Amino acid sequence: MRYVKQGEKTRWGDRQLVSGVNCHPESVYDDFLQTKLLYHKEDGRMFYHMVQSFPKGEPVDPTAAHAAALKLAEYFEGREVLVCAHTDRDHIHSHFIINSVSLDDGRKLHISEKELSELRQRNDRVCAEFGLPVFQPEQKKKVGAMTSAEYHVAAKGESWKFLLMNVIDECMRCAKNRDEFILLMRSEGYDVRWQDSRKNITYTTPDGKSAGTTGSMTKNI
């Protein structure tokens, strides 16, 4: 929750694109917990984390993206949802933190494949309603070592590999374990392949570029 609410990530002009559905962003953790205590369901999964992401480089208005995210959050009727739009990357995306216990009747949230399909279809309709693009994943590309030209670009802060390293460092500071690290990386649009049987960790960027690092880079997790 602290990660998705960060001011530098959610700031757009003089606004913070942070909202709560059936809860207050300032006290969202306590709101979630009070609901769980009310129904004696404070054990197990605390919340679900969902990300609505738009393609890199698309002219997406962050305020429209935030409004669309709030509209999509209505799918989880009767539940508390924290909605935060992130504007600090070159792809606008919104985070949803959804209480696993319903505020209305205390039911635990379970999303079936059918419901997941319905949610994706609703997402497409909401995006169309707000004039926003629907993400179509590109074919992944494998990229080798950084070239000298990339180092010159990186010096200007434009290299995707340096950006990847910055995102890794940022997620490492917030994650308490490997699963949280992978979840945070994926929420920023980066896929992570990290298996005990493999020496290298492979990262895939939002536009399909791949890079590998050794496990020692994340030895503190």
Image: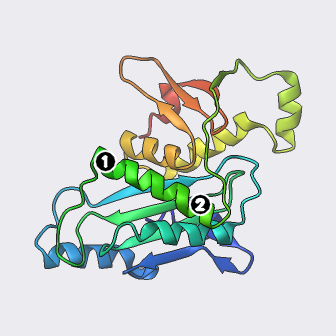
Tell me the SS state at disc 2: helix
Q: Which residue is mark 1?
A: 114
Q: With 45 as the anchor, is 18 left or right in this view?
A: right
Circle 1: is it few (<14), some (14-19), or many (20+) Cα within 10 Å?
A: few
**Quarter holding residue 66:** bottom right
Tag shown at residue 72: none
**Quarter holding residue 73:** bottom left
Compared to 174, does 68 lie above or below? below
Residue at (86% x, 23% y) in the render: 148
Report the front residue among 50 and 182: 50
Q: For the residues marked 1 and 2, what is the alpha-carbon distance in whole angstroms?
A: 20 Å
Numbered-mark total: 2
Residue 196 horizontal/vertical position (percent): 36, 22
Residue at (66% x, 72% y) in the render: 63
Q: Earlier in the sequence, mark 1 or mark 2?
A: 1
Residue 162 horizontal/vertical position (percent): 72, 38
Report the front residue among 58 and 16: 58
Residue at (48% x, 35% y) in the render: 218
